[in-house]
Amino acid sequence: MTANLADLRVQIDALDKELLALLNRRAQVAEQVGEIKKREGTPFFRPDRVAQVIEQIQQANKGPLKNEHVAAVWREIMSACLALESPVRVAYLGPAGTFSEEAALQFFGASIEHVPCISIDEVFRATAAGSASYGVVPVENSTEGVVSRSLDLFLNSPLHIVGEISLMVRHHLLRLSESLENIEAIYAHPQALAQCQGWLSMHLSNVERRAASSNAEGARLAAGNPAWAAIASDRAAAQFGLHTAAHAIQDDAFNRTRFAVVCLPQTLPSPPASGKDCVSLVVSVPNRPGAVHDILVPLKTHGVSMTRFESRPARSGEWDYYFYIDLQGHPSQDHVKAALDDLQHLCAFYKVLGTYPVSD
């Protein structure tokens, strides 16, 4: 006999109570783990451990839940349990509603202590000073390329990269009404304005575009003036009570932004090899013919793949450049270590920015 809706709801209610009891048992064990970590002085948050647990759960999953949904649920469970051990303070470009906040929540889970910052510089400062345990900063966009300010700040920062998250970015035009009429100004972060310039030129070519410190800050400004609009996320729309006047106005339908998770080495050392890792470094070479070619030779010799190569002016007045390089692999691998050793000897300046698992 087929169960009716009322019977199925009774089953779900009973299962929910069982789940809650099991989750609280897990939380009790997590509290014990936290006490041991306090005594031993070991890091509370271990992204490699989070990834390991999620992978094991996904391998055990027999459905009908999809693996990506299982991962999302377990990330939140682990985040809530970690908050019982020691709350994780995470700095990001604020205010609430930015893509940086969304990236932080996707990486750490919702049970974090939020430290919204007014600029990328402030994210670095707060994390380096210990006001936050971790920082989340944008480093690269699939449409506009690298986020120059983040790269520049890495040069002299004591922070290193311990993780990354790649976020699909959907930009919406937000305002107090749903109309595209009578808009006097559009506020957004310069990167967002650039990522939407095609749509803006076609639909709102005569409207002034104004830079804001973040997209969420632009949404906050638009919430205070019916003649203003902002380019921001669904989260920002909900946060500031705005309507979506136009959906997904980014020029690239597959627009993504890559964020780096940073911290002091004493907060979390470089994660161990995961089998899918990246080494990020910045170097400079003597200003002589063939110097840039020479730094690529060790990579070819030892069979190490380079996944990114960016140059930034050194601001020395001598037309010198820093080169930001991402390499595939982990320094614990012999061929990667050999390539890095050879490369270092060729450089006038050499700094490893971080070794970390790459995001999917």
Image (tube, helix red, strand yellow):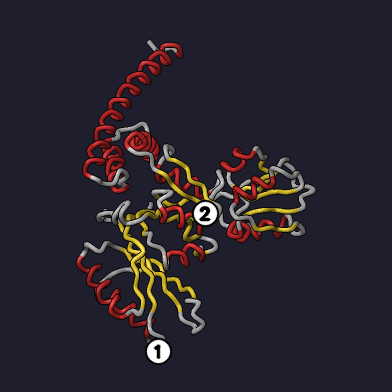
Q: Residue beneath label 2, please?
A: 254
Q: Disc 1 or disc 2, which is closer to the eye?
A: 1
Q: CA distance from mark 1 to mark 2?
A: 39 Å
How far across and how far down the image is residue 269, in percent? 29, 55
Q: Is residue 5 left or right of residue 238?
A: left
Tell me whether the residue at label 1 lies in contact with that at label 2, contact meaning CB atoms closer than 8 angstroms: no
Q: Is residue 251 left or right of residue 41?
A: right
Is disc 2 placed on a helix, strand or loop? loop
User: Can residue 251 be seen here?
Assistant: no
How far across and how far down the image is residue 120, in percent? 51, 57
Is disc 1 placed on a helix, strand or loop? loop
Q: Residue beneath label 1, please?
A: 289
Q: Amino acid at mark 1?
A: Pro
Above or below, 70 relative to 348:
above
Residue at image coords 75%, 56%: 207
Residue at image coords 45%, 11%: 6
Q: Amino acid at mark 2?
A: Phe
Location of residue 355 by image quarter: bottom left
Query: Is residue 348 or residue 233 the one in the foreground?
Result: 348
